[in-house]
Amino acid sequence: MQKELAYRENDGIAITLFWQSDSNRLSVSVYDWRNGDWFELEAGPRNAMDVFEHPYAYAAQTGPGRA
């Protein structure tokens, strides 16, 4: 089961922090409502909020998928 832990939206970009209860996995999803682009980053328990606050920085460092 997926649970939303945090959500924010600004200028048409929605960022959501999710927790998967079955796998205990954290992820951050970024969706751009303006053009339909999206990506997801895995996050660890120690950096989940940082990935949530700065997803583009993590995506630039690691590429979409892993942070």
Image (cartoon, grey):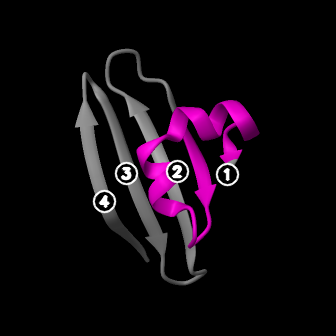
Q: Is residue 19 magenta?
A: no
Residue 51: percent from the left, percent from the top?
Answer: 52, 50
Magenta span includes 55:
yes
Classify 40 as above or below 6.
above
Q: Which mark is residue 16?
A: 3
Residue named by callout 4: 6
Residue 16: % across, % down: 37, 51
Query: Is residue 10 positioned above or below 8 on the image?
Result: above
Q: Residue at x 48, y 82 (%)?
A: 21
**Badges 2 and 1: C-beta atoms under 8 Å apart?**
yes
Q: Amino acid at mark 3?
A: Thr
Q: Which mark is residue 67?
A: 1
- Gap between marks 4 and 3, in whole Å? 6 Å
Which amino acid, mark 2? Val
* Residue, disc 2: 51
Residue 24: quarter of image? bottom right
